[in-house]
Image: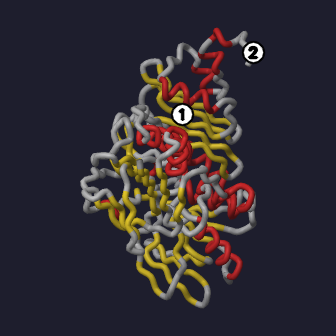
Amino acid sequence: MKYLIIGASAAGLSAAQRIRELDREGEITVLSEEQSSPYSKMSLPYLLSGECSQEEYLYLGIPKGIELLLNKKVVALREDRRIVEVESGEEFSYDRLLIATGARPYIPEVEKKGSPLLLTIRNLEDIFKLKERIKNAKEKKVLLAGAGLVNCEIADALWKIGIPSVLIVRSPRILSQILDEEGSRVIESCAKEKGIELLTGENIKKIEEKEGITYAILESGKILKGSCVVFGKGVQPAVDFLKDTGIKIGQGIEVNEYLQTSVEDVYAAGDVTESRDLLYEDLRGHALWPVAVEQGKIAGANMAGGKIAYPAEVSRNILTIFGKMVFTGGLSTEDEFEVYQEHFAGEYRKILVRDNRLVGFIFIGAVDNPGVYLFMLKNQIEVNGKINLLLKGAITYPAIYPSLRNMVF
């Protein structure tokens, strides 16, 4: 059996590892469009801040018994011939194929003058370019277009190394995809306390490079100057090479419960996919490292002859920014069903309950057992009068299953 995997990050490498465990004889080839060895993209902000060592913590292990080929950008899939073509003109054949190409940052059309440096933070090279620019720029401030997860993490990393930044947000608040209005205000306050500038209801109209300084002209007419512009306005699944194929694509590649695409013997996993969401009850992307790892394992097992279903997923995020842990899950931005909130001493907590089951939460501040909240979401465990424990961030497995209280682990 000849297995071909496009993409050498969490999903692709997890799949390769699982295939090798189940099929000792099969030929496994992984194609990566990057020139460097596979690395953890989650660690990029920590590499910028110096909290992560490139040599010790950034790079991922390569499963034994696979062939990893770097600098192989796939440009076409010919499913009728069971081959993929790469930019160099080479062709690679397969019996079973996994698409794990992830997602690419979205950069909106904007008027430019001169040669301004426009960055996204998705790859290792982006961090190197940003660090070099900051080092040599006349104006150190970094202009961050968008205030989603990535740009907030970059603002936090810049603050840690003493570099000023400004978040330019078209919407009225930051992190609007995962926080409600009150949660956004808490994080905005924390950011401002760290000296991070925030401009809401603003958008960049034009970017100009002049005498080593980047100028951003906003739609309001305000002019900002800095070292460069970093766009963090979301991502799009990397599916350009599939445009002439029979693979069904919505917002991402649509997969069934076995992570199969609409084309025979072609599977997909990770950020490039959209799969069933348990609580939203629709297909959507779940661009999370642990999701990519788990999907890769299941796709790999199924490619090797298994029949393992991937369960409906739940949206969630956990990160620490501006000195606060942010933990969200499920229908976090909603304000319907039974809503319970608590706001004190710079912390904010919110849980949503529907039909006696936890369906969403926001925690800004300490949470004792994050895994228990995800367990309750995914398994739709009944709340049964435990609202106070849930709201305090103190729910435990023994609280859910009293029979565990006297067990020693």
Report whether residue 161 is seen. Answer: yes
Q: 55 above or below 399?
A: below
- Between marks 1 and 2 in the image, the one whose residue lies nearer the viewer: 2
**SS state under label 2:** loop
The single residue placed furthest to the front in the displayed view is 25
Q: Residues within 10 Å of mark 1 (few under 14, many from 20)?
A: many
Please state which amino acid type lies under the numbered disc 2. Val
Q: Nearer the viewer, residue 47 or 77?
A: 77
Q: Quadrant of residue 92?
A: bottom left
Residue visible at 30% across and 50% down in the picture: 250
Q: Quadrant of the C terminus?
A: top right
Estimate the x, y position of residue 196 in percent, counting from the top left: 65, 62
In the displayed structure, does residue 278 sit left or right of residue 159?
left
At label 1, the amino acid type is Phe
Q: Residue at x 42, y 51 (%)?
A: 2
Q: Tell me which residue sits at (73%, 57%) in the image.
A: 52
Percent x, y of residue 290: 55, 42
Q: How many marks?
A: 2
271 relative to 241, above or below: above
Q: Position of residue 50 (x, y in %)?
A: 74, 61
- Residue 180 in percent (x, y) is at 50, 42
Earlier in the chain: of badge 1 and badge 2, it is 1
Q: Which residue is mark 2?
A: 408
- Mark 1 lies on residue: 361
> Is residue 291 at least partly visible in the picture?
no
How crowded pointer 2 is (Cα within 10 Å; few <14, some 14-19, many 20+) is rated as few
Disc 1, SS: strand
